[in-house]
Amino acid sequence: MGQLRDEQRQRAISALNGFLSTPLSDLLQPSTDRGVTSVLQLFQEIVTTVPAYQQFLAANDRSIHDIQTLEDFQTLPLITKENYLRQYSLSQLCRHGQLETCDLIAVSSGSTGKPTFWPRFISDELQIATRFEQIFYDSFQADQRRTLAVICFTLGTWVGGMYTTACCRHLATKGYPITVITPGNQKPEIFRVIRELGEQFEQVVLLGYPPFIKDVIDTGIAEGMEWQKYQVKLVFAGEVFSEEWRSLVGERVGSTQLNYDSASLYGTADAGVLGNETPLSICIRRFLAEHPDIAKQLFGESRLPTLVQYDPNSRFFEMENEEDSTTGTLLFSGDNGIPLIRYYIADQGGIIEFQQMLDFLKQWDFDPISELQKTGNRGIHQLPFVFVFGRSQFIISYFGANIYPENVTVGLEQPLIKDWVTGKFVMSVIEDTDQNRFLSVVVELAPGIAETEEKKAAIADSILTQLKRLNSEFANYVPPEYQTPKITLKLTGDPEYFPLGVKHRYTRKN
């Protein structure tokens, strides 16, 4: 056992030294081979140290000696929760078949509700802390500003809160003037710590799930919080949102530079943060939000995905796709407490190389780098982009047109309407007694707002306008007499549609 403990210590020292002594710019050097060398090295290490992966390859009649090049690597079988993570014991999935090579276990509930356990070691966190460092350095200039980081993710065994807390503390260890506080998802406690401590810092960063952060901001305003006093910055994870939503939330906290004042993380419980928004990716996404026709050419769909940059030496992405399609299902490989090779996460999306993105935008006379440099010079790294639509089960089909929650969301974020609603809704296709189909949207009213026929009509009109603008399938496939959605308004926290404390689903199959 002595040797194992010594190996643990060496792994921790090596990872800490690497993270603490390497400037961010060195950690983000463009990969000369798009991460291929790193991922092949990871594969070689895993096949010699992880018993479950050795057995998995043997069961698939694969010899490790066959894997020398990227082409060889791309013939390896995909791993999933079902065929890999649930087939082996937790210890077999870890290095040397020993769970104690990890020092923390987090839990994710998954879409099935059955918990999955994710062990990890401090070295895994330090790799992910670099994603947080990108945001705190490039977007928030937290190397120069005393910063209070307020963790608003759920705490306990759940992965988001503990992981985020650890990564922010690692930044403080590196020398950033960051102080972390962990009220979790308790709104009274969040307000208390900001009122008591906020003005002792030059900026306050709220980190949490987008709908919850918006709820915190709106409730704070209702309770007299003067958010502008605190120079609020925002870090999100867990959900796609529109650029109208970013503008709306930014306006409510007094944001002046939307490319720099917030950032979203693309993460999974399985492997921490895979990529993050950068000032450059936000600048590009805001341009595409205003030009849905250009966005559709780039992404292949009538909805705006999350767009992030990633480090291929840390997380190696591939795309399983149909021929000639810009999108497919994302796969990634990366080192964790449970290392993962060609892991199938069921997220729809695609990969765009850095120069490929700039060349595409140049066709439309848009140069995001010069646009960004009007307001700042940080956040421009030659890293590839990955875009993510999230899971396809949240789409509904109506007269052959795919309707996405993202399209409806924008309709609820328009002036006037945004003050009446929380932003939550449930959309479905319903048949009336004559078997005619119509689009139903059940909308949650903001606290203290009463239902009126005028509000219903205004909301229906706003959603219709945005559906026609953003979704050319909807505009062309759905007969005009069936295009206007049927709106139902419900009070905040309605137990049937908007139960409190439950992850919200935006679609319902009838």
Image (cartoon, rainbow, N blue to C red):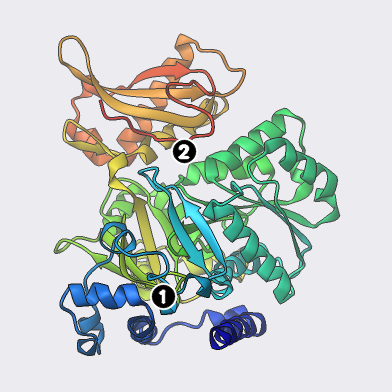
Graded by Cα atoms within 10 Å as few (under 14), some (14 to 19) or many (20 or more), the crowding at tag 2 reads few
The spot of residue 288 in percent (x, y) is: 40, 53
User: Marks 2 and 1: CB-CB under 8 Å?
Assistant: no
Q: Is residue 377 left or right of residue 408?
A: right
* Residue type at tag 2: Lys
The spot of residue 189 in percent (x, y) is: 74, 40
Residue matched to label 2 = 503
Q: Is residue 75 left or right of residue 470?
A: left
In this view of the protein, which residue sits in the foreground, 390 or 57?
A: 57
The spot of residue 104 in percent (x, y) is: 56, 64
Q: Is residue 287 left or right of residue 478?
A: right
Graded by Cα atoms within 10 Å as few (under 14), some (14 to 19) or many (20 or more), the crowding at tag 1 reads some
In this view of the protein, which residue sits in the foreground, 324 or 160?
A: 160
Q: How many marks?
A: 2
| Helix, strand or loop under label 2 | loop
Instruction: Determine whether 155 is above or below 312 in the image.
Output: above
* Residue type at tag 1: Gly
Indicate the quadrant containing the C terminus: top left, top right, bottom left or bottom right. Answer: top left
> Taking the image as drawn, is residue 41 in sight?
yes
Q: Is residue 400 left or right of residue 139?
A: left
Instruction: Determine whether 488 is above or below 235 in the image.
Output: above
Residue matched to label 1 = 97
Which residue shows up at 61% across the image and 69% down it?
A: 133
